[in-house]
Amino acid sequence: MCHQGEIETVLFVAELESMNRYSVKQVYEKLAGVKPRVHWDRMVWNRLITPKHRFICWLAVQCRLQTTTKLARIGISQSSLYMICGLENEDHQHLFFQCHCSCQIIQAVQNWLGLLMNGNLNQLVRKTGQCRASKFRKQVILAAIGTAVYLIW
């Protein structure tokens, strides 16, 4: 009797043998599956951003930062208010899109870089990827945005 793992191995070997030309990319896609492209990868994995900023950016774009609202929900924090503005609960939406303090930080970064883009953080990252600038300038802009995310956090 065959086990599930043995059947999958036989099927995988058969798929490899049916390939006209061996390709590492095709083998990797068969093993890992094809994943959808994300718009934030160039900001998070930018070589100009320090590793601790990369990690916080990676958590932020996936809405996985441990905000005080999440911590209050599980009983770790007493208050769920955002400590900088003190007006609303500290959740991902308020931190990066609604808080007037974080909007001022992002606006200051835009002014410093000479950008004329409006919108929230996600829109800024998308527009930077689509703008007509050199690759290095885009990396600098994305590094500044990543640092702003870290400082807001």
Image (tube, rainbow, N blue to C red):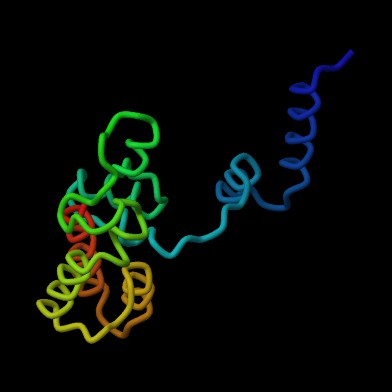
| Extreme residue in the right direction | 1
- Picture layout, residue 129 above or below residue 15: below
| Extreme residue in the top direction | 1
Residue drawn at point x = 63 percent, y = 46 percent: 33
| Residue 52: image location, x then y, percent | 20, 44
**Residue nearest the viewer, comparing 11 with 78:** 78
- Picture layout, residue 128 above or below residue 60: below
Residue 61 located left or right of residue 38: left
Residue drawn at point x = 19 percent, y = 56 percent: 152
| Residue 1: image location, x then y, percent | 89, 13
| Residue 83: image location, x then y, percent | 17, 50
Q: Quadrant of residue 78?
A: top left
| Extreme residue in the left direction | 112
| Residue 34: image location, x then y, percent | 61, 52
Residue 128 located left or right of residue 83: right
Residue 31 located left or right of residue 108: right
How many marks are shown on the rendered structure? 0
**Residue nearest the viewer, comparing 24 with 126:** 126
**Residue nearest the viewer, comparing 127 with 19:** 127
Residue drawn at point x = 57 percent, y = 44 percent: 28
Q: Quadrant of residue 6?
A: top right
Residue drawn at point x = 18 percent, y = 77 percent: 110
